[in-house]
Image: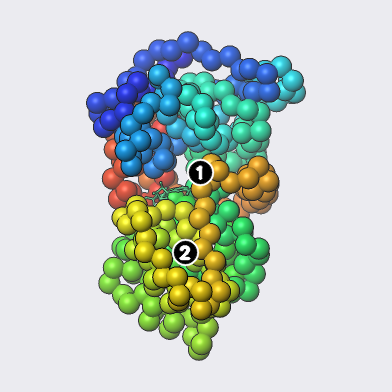
Amino acid sequence: MKAAWYESKGPAAEVLKLGDLPDPIPAAGEVRVRVHVSAVNPSDTKGRGGARGNIRMPFPRVIPHQDGAGVIDQVGEGVDQARIGERVWVYEATQGRAFGTAAQFTTVPAHKAVRLPDGVSFEAGACMGIPAMTAHRCVFADGPVTGRNVLVQGGAGAVGYYAVQMARLGGAAKVLATVSREEQAKRALEAGAHAVIQYKTENLVERVAQLLGGNARLDRVIEVAAGVNLAADVEMMAPRGVIAAYASDAVPQPPLPFWPMLSKDLTLRCVLVYVMSDEAHAEAVQYITRTLEAGAFVHQVHRVFEHDQIVEAHQACESMSNVGKVLVRIA
Ligand SMILES: NC(=O)c1ccc[n+]([C@@H]2O[C@H](COP(=O)([O-])OP(=O)(O)OC[C@H]3O[C@@H](n4cnc5c(N)ncnc54)[C@H](OP(=O)(O)O)[C@@H]3O)[C@@H](O)[C@H]2O)c1
């Protein structure tokens, strides 16, 4: 099969190779997926680049990418033969495994290949895994958001965009989103945000208070930049609110405003999609499937690269300046 891989960690242009590897065979309990679209997530590029000093190779050779979409073409022992031919989206293909979706075939445990409803494109399917599952956990882990005031920090990011949609579909009273430029504002509004705040030019705390009106405060914050935003989040929260944080790149060790948090009985929930429970994964899969079936999601794709543009695809994801997912077509 045609595949992209790396055998040492480092910059994309130095370590990513493209060539032929043997076709994988599904083990018992696994399916093999003929990948049509592979998605690049920041964790894929961080893993390849050796972020936070993590330079040890987990396996001698890694085919990157957790997420993708395609068609099941083989099943291992114990998996229903009827699944052959099923269109699926795939999540966590390289979680504890060496070979992900940046290849013509990937094998995954059968439950990690989820039926893609009729009419939903492979591009949309490849957006689901990390972004939509993380967003689901952040929005719903602490119960329904019906009638709640929700702020999504980074509302046009890959995760943030689905978090905005889920909060809105979940009946939140107000869904606010922070953005840093007009293109992002458009995306967050199309995702269903009631209003956006330009966090680089507007006073976030004042603007949120104004948008909520009266003495209303935030019940939930979905946070992409915990280290930068935690103090402001805490200031804007109502008592017993929850901040669900899934990243903190700029300030890796956020100072914790302990007493202001304690005085409001706040919860800081740290979300890592790979480590969340089996139940949380299953709930996310069921929710995503229902929402895809209802045609209720919108998706944002920055660009679909060709397989032999794998280096450019990784660089595009790493730039963190795109609006929308970076995808790779696997012919
Ligand atoms: N914990 C998990 O399970 C999990 C899952 C998925 C992703 N992640 C991590 O989450 C991060 C984002 O991933 P992604 O795929 O969503 O990336 P993305 O598509 O690049 O989105 C990141 C968004 O965050 C915004 N942002 C950055 N700094 C901000 C700030 N101080 N305030 C408000 N918004 C800010 C960016 O906008 P600007 O243009 O304004 O910078 C961008 O819209 C990455 O670090 C990734 O590794 C973690």
Which residue is rendered at x = 64% and y = 23% of the image?
A: 30
The one of 306 and 223 positioned closer to us in this rendering: 223
Q: Determine whether, in the image, residue 110 is placed left or right of residue 224.
A: right
Q: Secondary structure at mark 1?
A: helix
Q: Badge 1, how many Cα within 10 Å: few under 14, some, many 20+?
A: many
Up-down relation of residue 76 to residue 148 (above or below):
above
Q: Position of residue 131 (x, y in %)?
A: 49, 47
The one of 40 and 186 positioned closer to us in this rendering: 40
Which quarter of the picture shows residue 257? bottom left
Up-down relation of residue 79 to residue 266 (above or below):
above
Q: Position of residue 49 (x, y in %)?
A: 31, 34
Q: Badge 2, how many Cα within 10 Å: few under 14, some, many 20+?
A: many
Check the image and name the residue furthest to the front: 259
- Report which residue position mark 2 lands on: 152
Q: CA distance from mark 1 to mark 2?
A: 17 Å
Which residue is rendered at x = 51% and y = 74% of the image?
A: 262
- Report which residue position mark 1 lands on: 130
